[in-house]
Image: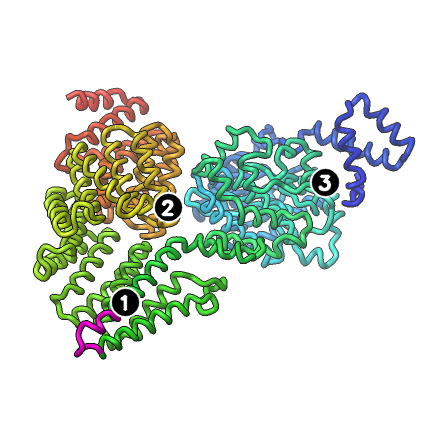
């Protein structure tokens, strides 16, 4: 069939629509009626319909040209090709069959993939194409591209290539099996772009990018395969007969492209460029994000697929996950494979990803991304919440990106400026306190005022900018800290006060490392200016101890807060600031499981606040909440609930219904409900608390991670595993962002998520999470952080965690590994003081299940006897 230009296709397309609605018996009469008006048109339509019927009858797109399961193919097993012996057939490409092979010359051991040219293609055109693939692979040396090892001709005359063997899954299956979220899928896709960019840099266009040609190993390593129809761009510039070559391949039975991932210009016979690969990559990203092809239902028919690729604009990715004619259960299944729900997935895809994918899928190659690197740059901007080039950079859009990155910072900057203004006011008032010190105080006030003016001026978007040209709140705070340390170097007392205030602000932003740095500097300056025994030094010690506790350094936090408490008791007596330190130190003891040491401190703090501040004060509400937490952990749920209701009422009255402390009271009431087994009531409390926290802190502050973790527990107990997994995935993500990958909270939340993934019958995903949790927990096995605001079930010992790992391996039928893990868990639990507890019984029950499944009834009976005793 001759090539059809895009202009002629637009003429023929409406007639083809009519033809497909006419029965096979009636088409002859229909064509005759058209021939009477336009014989040329009728002839073209007849040729297209005949080709369509041939393709349909041959099962085009549904099976390979050569069936790899034929006896001829299978008979190759055991044959020696060069230095390799063929072991088993592993794939079939357009130009050849692919075999797993092992080295046979004894020089060294190793596996490889051997690609043999199909017998049907032996001949000049097929061999030239096969040789070209070897030439192309020889030019490519990149860790994300399967490299060429050897090439030659077999004893039977078949050309062959020896390639790196990649033991992995197609990228779409890997993403689904590992329940990767949207951002994780984008990051993996960036590895694919890196490989294609390397090929383009070597003047090679792949031309057949699809999931089957992008494998991912079990360790997450991407490998790009199959350059069988790749094209050297300089050959085309030199005038090679691309059309003739394609025709030769077609005559010899080769599959020149995969239509589902072909660009419009490939189907229309127009020149192929790097933009062709950009289009195929856009289709691949569309599939990874939505689980569907951009053509939607049109992909089910060859004719409608080709027409959709050439003529129709695909649905936006955010619309595809909730509509496009797919059944709701199919959409919900894909969303769950992304670790979320359909509605939330739509929100994650809406906006930037809609625009990025749409640009890659433009019909006109010149309107797509100019290069794969430009495509990758926009995806990296999306991950960093920066403006992307695929969307118009309107002021509203730029502002929205900025606020999304810094929502908590925008809120806290206002509080910081208020702090500075307050300090200015304090120092101004001191001017009238002592006439002899008036000049000195006036100089301090001037310095604070100058500092404030400098910070406000630096907030001008023309003054501080990131690489993207936008002003940042973090830059404002960092500039302020640098200015305080520089401009107030000759005023250590004033500098200590300012740095203490700023350190507290950084702590509330969740920037704990920076907070610690400033507070340690403030402590040194304060001790120099005021001496070791001063209320300002005690305040800095209090803030520093709280930051160390936030970071999980409970030993350091305890020592620092004990110093602060001793100093405040000595200098202040029964003062409200003494209660503040009592509360912080009590929390540190609780977080270490030392409730007996924590309870008297919280009771003393409550007594001081009731005496000094009154029973209706907002700080009294805080002490009510902290004491309730101790009672709850000690099993006194009624006593805890009474105090928490009082705390909630006081918080609403003194701080407002939307204050973060109100959220704490609601959250802890949820913990009490969970302790009673009322998980629906617990869920309600956690969701109310979470809504208030999001409103106060934005969407990434680590304070919300504990709430999400407890919400997940309540959802799990109700059997709502998908929702529970979604909540915990968010908790892990925000905890990693705040504390890094090796914090104990990351381990706790990852282990909790693993238990849910196991309940969802996803043992492989659970195993990955558990091994990561064990890696972190093994570094500090004695620390179980944030017990004060979590459920008892989060007290994961190494033994309990290995027991859960054993359950995962059992579910995967990896019996020897499961046995090792469970026996290790049993030994570790036996070493604990409460070795006969519930967790030990769980381990024994799992061992019984293991030996029953493994077919070892004697061992199962032995452990069953232990359980019975």
Residue 694 numbered mark, or none? 2
Q: Is residue 66 visible?
A: no
State yes or no: residue 431 in magenta: yes
765 or 308: which is nearer to us?
308
How far apart marks 3 and 2 lie (CA) works out to 59 Å
Tell whether 241 sits left or right of 31. left
Marked residue nearer the N-terminal end (1 or 2):
1
Quadrant in the picture for residue 7: top right
Residue at 32% from the left image edge and 54% from the top image edge: 510
Tell whether 477 sits left or right of 590. right
State yes or no: residue 751 in magenta: no
Residue at 86% from the left image edge and 24% from the top image edge: 29
Quadrant in the picture for residue 819: top left
Name the secondary structure under disc 2: helix
User: Considering the image in quadrants, where does the N terminus appear?
Assistant: top right
Other residues around mark 2 within 10 Å, as few (<14) / some (14–19) / many (≥20)? some
Q: Position of residue 698 (x, y in %)?
A: 38, 49
Residue at 31% from the left image edge and 40% from the top image edge: 709
427 up-or-down from 206: above or below: below
Q: Position of residue 687 (x, y in %)?
A: 35, 37
| Residue ID for mark 1 | 425
Other residues around mark 3 within 10 Å, as few (<14) / some (14–19) / many (≥20)? some
The residue furthest right is: 36
Q: Position of residue 258 (x, y in %)?
A: 64, 40
Magenta stretch, main secondary structure class: helix
Give the residues in magenta: 427-438
Residue 249 numbered mark, or none? none
Marked residue nearer the N-terminal end (3 or 1):
3
Q: Is residue 729 visible?
A: yes
| Residue ID for mark 3 | 250
How far apart marks 1 and 2 lie (CA) works out to 32 Å
Tell whether 110 sits left or right of 250. left
């Amino acid at each position: 069939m001759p090539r059809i230009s895009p202009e002629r296709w637009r003429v023929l397309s409406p007639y083809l629509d009519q033809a497909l609605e006419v029965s096979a018996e009636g088409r002859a009469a229909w064509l005759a009626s058209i021939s009477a008006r336009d014989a040329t048109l009728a002839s073209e339509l007849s040729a297209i319909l005949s080709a369509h019927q041939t393709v349909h009858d041959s099962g085009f797109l549904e099976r390979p040209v050569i069936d790899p399961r034929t006896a001829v193919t299978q008979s190759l097993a055991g044959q020696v090709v060069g230095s390799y012996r063929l072991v088993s057939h592993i794939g079939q490409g357009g130009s050849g069959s692919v075999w797993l092979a092992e080295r046979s010359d004894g020089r060294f051991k190793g596996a490889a993939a051997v690609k043999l040219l199909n017998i049907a293609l032996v001949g000049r055109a097929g061999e030239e194409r096969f040789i070209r693939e070897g030439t192309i692979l020889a030019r490519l040396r990149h860790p994300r591209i399967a490299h060429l090892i050897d090439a030659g001709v077999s004893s039977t005359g078949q050309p062959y290539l020896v390639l790196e063997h990649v033991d992995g899954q197609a990228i779409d299956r890997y993403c689904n099996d590992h329940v990767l979220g949207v951002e994780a899928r984008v990051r993996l896709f960036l590895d694919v772009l890196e490989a294609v960019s390397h090929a383009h840099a070597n003047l090679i266009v792949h031309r057949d990018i699809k999931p089957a040609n992008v494998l991912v190993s079990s360790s997450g390593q991407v490998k790009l395969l199959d350059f069988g129809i790749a094209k050297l761009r300089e050959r085309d510039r030199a005038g090679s007969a691309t059309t003739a070559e394609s025709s030769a391949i077609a005559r010899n039975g080769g599959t020149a492209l995969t239509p589902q991932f072909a660009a419009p210009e490939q189907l229309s016979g127009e020149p192929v460029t790097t933009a062709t690969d950009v289009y195929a990559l856009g289709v691949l990203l569309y599939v990874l994000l939505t689980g569907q092809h951009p053509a939607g239902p049109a992909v089910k028919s060859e004719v409608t697929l080709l027409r959709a690729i050439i003529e129709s604009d695909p649905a936006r990715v955010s619309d595809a996950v909730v509509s496009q004619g797919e059944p709701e259960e199919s959409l919900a299944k894909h969303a769950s494979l992304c670790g979320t729900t359909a509605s939330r997935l739509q929100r994650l895809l809406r906006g930037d990803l809609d625009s990025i994918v749409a640009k890659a899928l433009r019909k006109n190659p010149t309107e797509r991304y100019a290069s794969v690197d430009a495509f990758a740059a926009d995806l990296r901007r999306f991950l960093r919440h920066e403006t992307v080039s695929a969307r118009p950079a309107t002021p509203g859009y730029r502002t929205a990106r900025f606020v999304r990155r810094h929502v908590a910072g925008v809120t806290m900057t206002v509080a910081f400026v208020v702090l500075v203004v307050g300090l200015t006011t304090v120092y101004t008032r001191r001017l009238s306190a002592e006439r002899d010190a008036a000049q000195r105080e006036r100089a301090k006030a001037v310095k604070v005022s100058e500092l404030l003016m400098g910070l406000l001026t630096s907030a001008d978007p023309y003054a501080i900018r990131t690489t993207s040209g936008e002003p940042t709140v973090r830059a404002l705070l960092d500039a302020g800290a640098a200015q305080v340390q520089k401009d107030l170097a000759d005023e250590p007392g004033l500098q200590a006060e300012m740095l203490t205030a700023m350190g507290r602000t950084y702590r509330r932003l969740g920037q704990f490392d920076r907070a610690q740095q400033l507070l340690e500097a403030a402590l040194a300056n304060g001790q120099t200016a005021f001496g070791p025994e001063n209320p300002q030094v005690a305040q800095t010690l209090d803030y520093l101890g709280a930051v160390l506790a936030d970071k999980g350094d409970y030993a350091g936090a305890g020592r620092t807060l004990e110093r602060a408490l001793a100093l405040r008791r000595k200098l202040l007596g029964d003062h409200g600031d003494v209660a503040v330190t009592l509360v912080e130190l009590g929390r540190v003891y609780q977080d270490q499981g030392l409730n007996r040491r924590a309870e008297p401190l919280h009771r003393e703090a409550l007594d001081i606040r009731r005496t000094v501040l009154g029973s209706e004060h907002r700080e009294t509400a805080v002490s009510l909440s902290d004491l309730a937490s101790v009672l709850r952990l000690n099993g006194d749920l009624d006593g805890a609930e009474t105090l928490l209701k009082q705390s909630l009422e006081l918080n609403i009255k003194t701080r407002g219904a939307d204050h973060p402390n109100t959220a704490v009271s609601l959250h802890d009431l949820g913990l009490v409900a969970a302790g009673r087994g009322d998980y629906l009531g617990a869920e309600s409390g956690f969701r109310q608390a979470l809504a208030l926290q999001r409103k106060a802190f934005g969407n990434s502050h680590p304070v919300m991670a504990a709430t999400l973790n407890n919400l997940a527990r309540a959802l799990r107990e109700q059997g709502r595993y998908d929702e529970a997994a979604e909540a915990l995935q968010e908790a892990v993500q925000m905890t990693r962002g705040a504390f890094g990958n090796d914090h104990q909270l990351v381990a706790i939340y990852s282990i909790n998520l693993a238990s849910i993934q196991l309940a969802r019958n996803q043992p492989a995903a659970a195993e990955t999470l558990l091994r990561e949790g064990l890696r972190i927990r093994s570094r500090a096995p004695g620390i179980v952080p944030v017990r004060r605001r979590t459920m008892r079930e989060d007290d994961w010992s190494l033994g309990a965690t290995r027991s859960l790992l054993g359950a995962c391996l059992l579910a995967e039928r990896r019996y020897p590994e499961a046995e090792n893990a469970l026996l290790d868990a049993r030994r570790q639990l036996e070493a604990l003081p409460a070795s006969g507890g519930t967790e030990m019984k769980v381990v024994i029950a799992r061992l019984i299940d293991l030996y029953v499944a493994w077919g070892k009834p004697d061992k199962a009976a032995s452990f069953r006897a232990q359980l019975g005793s």
